[in-house]
Amino acid sequence: MSALRYVYAVCRPLDAPLQAELTGIGGAPPALLHHHGLVAVVSTVPEADFDEQGLRARLEDLDWLSATARAHQGVIAALSTVTTPLPLRLATVFRDDSGIRAMIESREDDFRRALDRLEGRVEWGVKVFVESEPAEPAAAQAAKPASGRDYLRSRRRHSEAHEERWQQAESFARSLHERLSLHSEDFRMHPAQNSALSGASGQNVLNAAYLVPRSGCEEFVELVDRTKDETPGIRVELTGPWAAYSFSGEEA
Amino acid sequence: MTVVERREIALVDLLDRLLAGGVVITGDLTLRIADVDLVRIDLNALISSVNETVPSPFEELL
């Protein structure tokens, strides 16, 4: 079966070896490919899964996508314990190591700049949700509107309450974001998550990533923790620390 | 912080980062799969596998 080389990340030479039992996609052990003072972290993957046609089909398979994404993240997380990696987009593959060396040569200045910028920093994810509307009081539901005008009035009250909730959530999210921006070096806004995908209750109104120096993490996490009970009906979720995925893009 | 680190990472949070973040490099084979295509394929797949009856909420984004 033909094979391809999958690249997880680029980093500087490691001071400590990767854990021996570490496995990447499909259970293959990741290897370090040194070139021009940089290191590409790579493993071998089946061509059938990662050539253009194969990948299109595989991405429709949630179990495969999930296993692949988790294996990619597993390698990045292991790297993060020994260095500051520059993670690559999911499913970056090459025919052989000489292709990877050529890629490093063509991008080495960008890589060095990005690695310098991210050195010693991690990413935290912060999400804000508006909890689902509380059920209307039973009395209000039971009472039949006496007239069309009563009905419209009750509808309006309901929609005003809904509107108020959203405004409150948006202003909470804005103020939280301002505070977190002051305690981070950079931020990225991800699109709001759909609850059908996340399985989370409530509506997602903020889905942000913050770049924080390791030395500032404790303070950042405490800051988020303190806001959690600030406003009833609003939920704050913190994820991380992540490798700086959201800050490794083109503008890096 | 220990509590946070021990919790299993949600797939959506991971995909926010792996499909929209990370350095974009033109590999040998993903060349013709543009970023947008990759994300579109993925979201369609996710939505259909999460729940066949949920209408796509991403229509307006694409």
Image (tube, grey):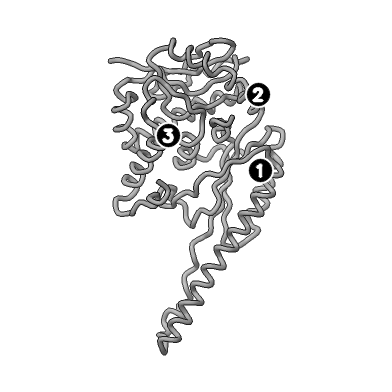
Q: Which of B28 and B47 is in front in this view?
A: B28
Q: Which amino acid does label 3 sit on?
A: Asp
At which x and y percent is residue B38? 39, 35
List the residue tagged with mark 1.
A221
| Front label number (2 vs 1) | 2
Q: Mark 1 lies on which chain?
A: A
Q: Which of B32 and A155 is in front in this view?
A: B32
Earlier in the chain: of badge 2 and badge 1, it is 2
To the question of a shared chain for discs 1 and 3, the answer is no
At which x and y percent is residue A33? 50, 12
Residue occupying the point 36% across, 17% down = A4
Q: Is residue B58 left or right of residue A187?
A: left
Residue occupying the point 68% across, 42% down = A220
Q: Look at the image and tell me whether residue A92 can be seen.
A: yes
Give above or below for A116 relative to A179: above
Residue occupying the point 50% across, 18% down = A41
Q: Which chain carries label 3?
A: B
List the residue tagged with mark 2.
A116
Residue occupying the point 57% across, 45% down = A208
Q: Mark 2 lies on which chain?
A: A
* Quadrant of image for the N terminus of chain A: top left
Q: Is mark 2 on a helix, strand or loop?
A: helix
Give above or below for A196 relative to A152: above
Q: Residue B35 carries which label?
A: 3
Q: Are marks 3 and 2 in contact (CB under 8 Å)?
A: no
